[in-house]
Image: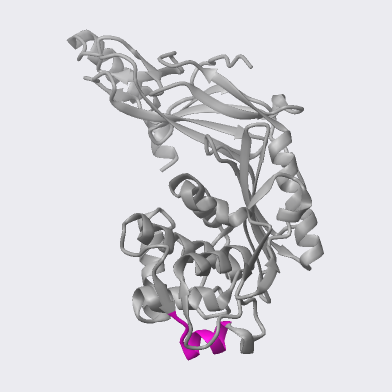
Amino acid sequence: MQLRLFPPFASILGLVLLVLCTVPASAQLFETKATQAFMIDADTGTVLFAKDPDKPIPPASMAKLMTMEMVFNAIKSKRITLDDTFVVSENAWRTGGAPSGTSTMFAKLKSEVRVEDLIQGVTVQAANDGCIVLAEGMAGSEANFAAQMTDRARQIGLSKSTFVNSTGLPADGQQTTVRELTMLALHLWRDYPEFFHYYGQPDFTWNKIAQRNRNPLIAMGIEADGFVAGASEQAGFGLVGTVSHNGIRVIAALTGLANDRERSEEARKLLDWGSRSFQKTEIFAKDEVVGEAQVFGGAKSGLALKAKGPVDIFLPIANRDKLTARIVYQGPVSAPVEEGQPVGELRVWIGDTLSQQTPLYAAESVKVGTLPQRALDAAKELAVGWLRQKHL
């Protein structure tokens, strides 16, 4: 799709938007019964769907993604190994084991379990006892481990997620969002490829007990290979899932469904739509000028902008007219400007979803202008200064 540059809007409060391609406001391209949902393309990070994605929700079993991040990170950092063993405490056994009536791998009280078996118990069976055994073995207590989970969440960019336990069982103050669950799942897929395969196992037999994967997507034959389902009284039924189809991997989180059947169906529909309804498209080649920013006090009035590489986005196959793209920067940009200097970003909407944000940089250097050039720019700024003041 060819994007065409139109003249810039007036600079208001220093924010300049260059409209590249514009269409009337439109509704979401997909409808779901979920009260909160968020989906991205894993390769580019393009947001394909968003519905109230930043509302705090209790994570339920989806908190186990953060538990596994802690474990995978510890293994990668060589603090623990897959062959290490941890003891099943009475707390782990009663809270998450056979007596709990919750999802469990049936680890025996006071037994020692290998880390790899605990990982499979958690990723395949959403085992609460497995989570607690790992938490206690790694941090001395589940409370300590949960505090470390929150700290680690901040380190990887999850600003709204707070964890009180390792399992996601109901607890005051424990919360996340579907956006952050999706980004956490993306992080697991990108940063720990050597462990990702555990999530796609259809079943796991341990201690002579065979159990099927609790993620309903795995058995649907839709090329799903992760992640986890959960449910809470407050937020309803939810799921974090991923599918890979024809070289496109999408990751989504959704919640607020009425029951497990509705959860399975809505998750399947969303992921299937995401993996089949978009096409990767290069809208700007490497080193191609994306647009131009206004310059104040420079030897020239315009500054060419480009990204650091090609700009790829995912366009809806059947609704390409739903694209809106804008260059956004604080401006006009004051001279002198050095080539490569960060200036703004390219924002792309699909429908009314902000789908992608790509940093833009100066494609050239602009020196300070002559005295007459600077005087002319000052006069131009005075002419629109009242408009800025009006909007303060």
Q: Nearer the viewer, residue 227 or 26?
A: 227
Residue 380 point in image, percent of width and height = 35, 19
Residue 136 point in image, percent of width and height = 40, 79
How many numbered badges does the structure rendering display?
0
The stretch in magenta equals 87-96
Q: Is residue 51 at least partly visible in the picture?
A: no
Residue 276 point in image, percent of width and height = 73, 35
* Position above or below: 127 against 280: below
Location of residue 19 by image quarter: top right
Q: Looking at the image, which residue sits at the far front?
A: 208
- Relative to 89, is 381 on the left or the right? left
Residue 273 point in image, percent of width and height = 74, 40
Give the residue displayed 70% in from the left and 44% down from the top. 223
- Relative to 166, is 152 on the left or the right? left
On-image quarter of the N terminus? top right
* Position above or below: 200 against 312: below
Query: Is-magenta flag for residue 93?
Result: yes
On-image quarter of the C terminus? top left
Q: Is residue 284 at least partly visible in the picture?
A: yes
Query: Is-magenta flag for residue 95?
Result: yes
Give the residue displayed 52% in from the left and 68% down from the top. 117
- Relative to 193, is 77 on the left or the right? left
Q: Nearer the viewer, residue 323 or 42?
A: 42
Q: Nearer the viewer, residue 5 or 177?
A: 177
Secondary structure predominantly adopted by residues drawn in magenta: helix
